[in-house]
Amino acid sequence: MHNRKRIATGLVISGGWLSLLFFGPFWLFWLTFLALGAMSLNEYYGMTLANFSRIDKITGTVLGLFPLLAAFEGRFEIVSAALFLSLFFLIVYSLTRYSTLNDKDSEANGLVLMMRLGFGIFYVGFSFSHFTLLLTLEKGRDLLILLTVITVFSDSFAYYTGMFLGKHKLAPAISPGKTIEGFLGGIFGSILGAIVVGRMFFPDFPMLYMVILTTILSTIGVMGDLTESMIKRTMGVKDSGNILPGHGGVLDRLDSLMIATPVLFYILNFGIIKI
């Protein structure tokens, strides 16, 4: 039953995502990621601020949406300004809250609140804004398809390679199920997927560069996955949420993409690789 739910949910997500990329107007894409960002912020603060007040979680979610709102303009400098504005208001809010959270020996103290709020704004809000920023680049939709294929193939090949060949743990303290063999299998799978997509959408892009770029993005995706796993393990939760039957929360599905997407954006935006 669990597998059937997971497969059904996966098919719905895949269909919606591809429809959005191929046919959705820019405003709908931005609005979709604004909503996904709000849900992800809510999940993140639900995990990390369980011992704090509801107003703290609401404040973090609102401040985390600033970069996502600013991404509508499609300009990185405006998103950066929005991030600074979020962090500035975070400082103001933390100063007003400190007097009621001044027990340095308690987990729910002022510094912990500021750090967890601040990381959520950066980790979720700022990272999510890059989905929209990437879309504004030349061939932005094709780039998002490429990134999606890299992530999906990496996850799938890593899972099955780890299941049948995995012997050496990759990060046992964070995610005991991940293996070095699975990690290498994931890179191999992501390269295969990227070559197919590259031939279709980027025929003039050298395959050697595609292999290098894919290896970087696949590795970054694993780091994103491990980052969320570390947060969940520290907070003692299995999933970030339960909004997606069989898959957990939004963060559970986008943890790899939300870190790999900014990396790809900066590689292209600063001309490190031209695709």
Image (cartoon, rainbow, N blue to C red):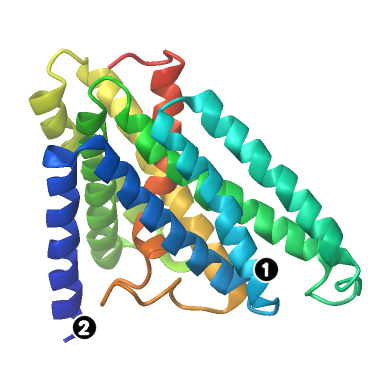
Task: Specify the label residue 213 is tagged with.
Answer: none
Does any portion of residue 75 appear in the rendered image? yes
Q: Residue at x 19, y 60 (%)?
A: 13
Residue 22 lies left or right of residue 186; in this view the side is left
Give percent across and percent down for residue 205. Answer: 21, 16
Residue 34 lies left or right of residue 61; in this view the side is left
Q: Secondary structure at mark 1?
A: helix
Q: Secondary structure at mark 2?
A: helix
Q: In terms of depth relative to the viewer, which is nearer, 35 or 191? A: 35
What's the residue type where badge 1 is placed? Answer: Asp
Task: Residue under label 2, please give it.
Answer: 2
Task: Specify the label residue 56 is tagged with.
Answer: 1
Position of 75 relative to 173 (above/below): above
What's the residue type where badge 2 is placed? Answer: His
Give percent across and percent down for residue 222. Answer: 42, 50
Quarter holding the C terminus is: top left
User: Distance from label 1 to label 2 (Cα)?
Assistant: 34 Å
Does any portion of residue 173 appear in the rendered image? no
Q: Quadrant of residue 141?
A: top left
Give percent across and percent down for residue 121. Answer: 59, 51
Dot placed on the residue nearer the N-terminal end, 1 or 2: 2
Position of 165 relative to 89 (above/below): below
Q: Residue at x 30, y 62 (%)?
A: 162
Q: Quadrant of residue 173?
A: bottom right
Quarter holding the N terminus is: bottom left
